């Protein structure tokens, strides 16, 4: 996976947002939360967190610590926590973000490898939840399909599931941590002749547990982070594995274990090494991204030179590892411990740069006329992006299309009250921003309480505000989703993609900045809350 390192459950839809719910849960909810539901009441919480992946568990920790008076629950669409790291099961699944920054700032990652595999990251999420008493707050198999805000009642009604399995909750504030892509399916282009192919076709997002690729010819379509992970992981067992790409991707090789962390660990405890390494990696990531964007020609040459050094002077680097775009116009893929290059040098793996004419019985016919033989074809062709996990969102009965809205600081939406949605960085670890969003959200909740105002709504008063794409990326999966993703303009109506700017603005910046309006709850809403509290007491 990429360093978006997405988090939790979602709900998909045929147009802008919708869902295929999971089966009803076996009721893993805490016993203390059951009485209201048993009495036929709709359970109410101060805050509902959506998703129990990296972001959701982190949000729960910060909420407990900084807003201990707030009641909350976590609605998780799947049967287990972990989000991305519970969903993806393909060989070698890992993050391409180091765990010093993908890990939480409050719960150190203590294992030796900085680049961790998926099961280890999932285990880290589970251990964090258990360590801080979060697990019992999670309601599994609660696949959120709709959020509906009532200004008259000053609260959200959140619907999970459909039909006989539907469950509803109300809350004062929604904290969405459901990631940014569709969980039900990945993106697969229309390939001519798919029905003619006699072997197996699989997508990494739906990897069969019983897929046997030992001794078989495997073709992986794509050259993104997933393909770069799959190739070396499958190379030893496959007869041969080929990465078939339409165009190359930039690669950057680095050790999977940090030599600096290893050195520091020789005389410092893990609790001291972790914050040092976290800040070292943060500074390195931010400086490298800015330097690469500022010097595209030089950065391109350095990446090409590294690939040439790894693969030798006779390898056609220009054809297979030299993209036509500048570095960081799309993501740069990580090659930990030179694993992809070693697989190629061993002869067990190869790279083919060509376009697909059609599928045939024995493989893929290329535009060049060559037949790329295959027993198994893996379509590592990307994700389908979604806003708020694909759930429908209504404000006072009006359906919200986020493609028509501005993002506020990359975490709230124009004219949508009391809703924060976590979206990480494209140029650094997801959790870095998730932690900062948690800082902001807890500060916002405490400010609302302090001034006696219960509704927070981003409001844009400038009709001439530019409306640009949410992500400054040329990748296909981003371009395909432009219509359903929010737009951005001038600050604060944009996602800065800058950790240090977020550090200042989200952790320390002014809450009521003129764009974010805090207003009091309506009298009827106050009466409704008082009535529910009274009924619960009786």
Image (cartoon, helix red, strand yellow):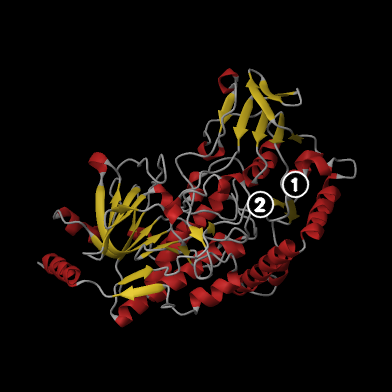
Residue at numbered disc 2 = 330
Residue at image location 71% in from the left, 65% down from the top: 288
Q: Is residue 150 left or right of residue 253?
A: left
Instruction: Indicate the position of residue 19 as horizontal and vertical percent values.
Output: 37, 43
Q: Toward the viewer: 415 or 165? A: 415
Q: Residues within 10 Å of mark 1 (few under 14, many from 20)?
A: some
Label ID, residue 178: none
The reply to whether residue 393 is in sight is: yes
Residue at far left of view: 538
Whether residues under marks 2 and 1 lie with C-beta atoms below 8 angstroms apart, the answer is yes
Residue at image location 56% in from the left, 30% down from the top: 190
Label ID, residue 323: 1
Q: Toward the viewer: 23 or 385? A: 385
Residue at image location 78% in from the left, 59% down from the top: 299
The reply to whether residue 132 is in sight is: no
Residue 456 vertical placement versus 113 (above, below): below
Q: Toward the viewer: 193 or 473? A: 473
Residue 11 vertical placement versus 49 (above, below): above
Mark earlier in primary sequence (2, 1): 1
Residue 88 vertical placement versus 112 (above, below): above
Q: Residues within 10 Å of mark 2 (few under 14, many from 20)?
A: many
Calculate the distance from the C-alpha at mark 2 to the C-alpha at mark 1.
10 Å
Instruction: Indicate the position of residue 98 as horizontal and vertical percent values.
Output: 63, 60
Instruction: Indicate the position of residue 508 as horizontal and vertical percent values.
Output: 50, 79
Q: Is residue 127 left or right of residue 103?
A: left
Q: Is residue 70 left or right of residue 294?
A: left
Q: Is residue 63 left or right of residue 293?
A: left
Residue at image location 43% in from the left, 58% down from the top: 405
Residue at far right of view: 313
Instruction: Indicate the position of residue 345 as horizontal and vertical percent values.
Output: 81, 40
Q: Toward the viewer: 157 or 85? A: 157
Q: Secondary structure beneath disc 1?
A: loop
């Amino acid at each position: 996976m990429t360093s978006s390192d997405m988090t939790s459950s979602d709900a998909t839809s045929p147009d802008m947002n919708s869902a295929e719910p999971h089966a009803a849960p076996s009721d893993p909810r805490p016993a203390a939360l059951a009485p209201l539901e048993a009495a036929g009441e709709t359970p109410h919480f101060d805050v509902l967190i959506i998703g129990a992946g990296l972001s959701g568990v982190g949000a729960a920790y910060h909420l407990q610590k900084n807003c201990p008076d707030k009641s909350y629950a976590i609605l998780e669409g799947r049967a287990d926590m972990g989000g991305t790291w519970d969903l993806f099961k393909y060989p070698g699944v890992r993050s391409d973000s180091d765990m010093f920054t993908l890990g939480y700032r409050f719960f150190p990652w203590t294992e030796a490898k900085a680049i961790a595999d998926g099961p280890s990251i999932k285990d880290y999420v589970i251990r964090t939840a258990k360590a801080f008493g979060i697990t019992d707050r999670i309601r599994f198999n609660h696949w959120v399909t709709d959020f509906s805000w009532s200004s008259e009642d000053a609260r959200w009604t959140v619907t999970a599931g459909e039909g006989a399995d539907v469950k509803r909750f109300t809350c004062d504030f929604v904290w969405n941590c459901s990631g940014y892509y569709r969980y039900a399916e990945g993106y697969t282009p229309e390939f001519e002749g798919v029905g003619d192919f006699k072997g197996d076709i699989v997508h990494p997002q739906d990897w069969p547990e019983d897929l046997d690729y030992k001794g078989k010819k495997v073709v992986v379509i794509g050259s993104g982070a997933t393909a770069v992970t799959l190739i070396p992981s499958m190379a030893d067992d496959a007869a041969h594995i080929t990465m078939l790409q339409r165009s190359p991707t930039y690669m950057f090789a680095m050790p999977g274990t940090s030599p600096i962390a290893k050195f520091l660990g020789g005389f410092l405890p893990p609790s001291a090494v972790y914050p040092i390494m976290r800040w070292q990696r943060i500074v390195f990531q931010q400086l490298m991204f800015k330097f690469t964007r500022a010097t595209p020609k030089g950065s391109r040459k350095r990446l090409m030179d590294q690939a040439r050094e790894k693969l030798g002077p006779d390898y056609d680097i220009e054809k297979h590892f030299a993209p036509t775009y500048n570095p960081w116009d799309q993501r740069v893929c990580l090659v930990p411990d030179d694993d992809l290059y070693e697989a190629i040098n061993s002869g067990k793996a190869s790279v083919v740069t060509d376009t697909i004419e059609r599928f045939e019985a024995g493989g893929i016919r290329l535009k060049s006329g060559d037949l790329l033989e295959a027993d198994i074809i893996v379509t590592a062709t990307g994700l389908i992006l979604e806003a708020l996990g694909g759930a429908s969102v209504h404000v006072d009965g009006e359906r919200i299309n986020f493609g028509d809205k501005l993002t506020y600081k990359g975490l709230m939406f124009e004219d949508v009250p009391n809703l924060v949605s976590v979206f990480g960085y494209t140029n650094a670890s997801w959790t870095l921003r998730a932690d900062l969003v948690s800082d902001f959200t807890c500060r916002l909740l405490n400010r609302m309480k302090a001034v006696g105002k219960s509704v927070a709504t981003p409001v844009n008063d400038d009709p001439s505000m530019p409306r640009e794409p949410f992500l400054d990326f040329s990748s296909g999966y981003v371009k395909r989703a432009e219509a359903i993703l929010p737009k951005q303009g001038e600050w604060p109506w944009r996602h800065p993609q800058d950790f240090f700017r977020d550090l200042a603005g989200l952790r320390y910046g002014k809450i009521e900045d003129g764009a974010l309006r805090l207003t009091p709850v309506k009298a009827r809403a106050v009466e409704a809350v008082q009535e529910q509290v009274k009924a619960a007491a009786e």
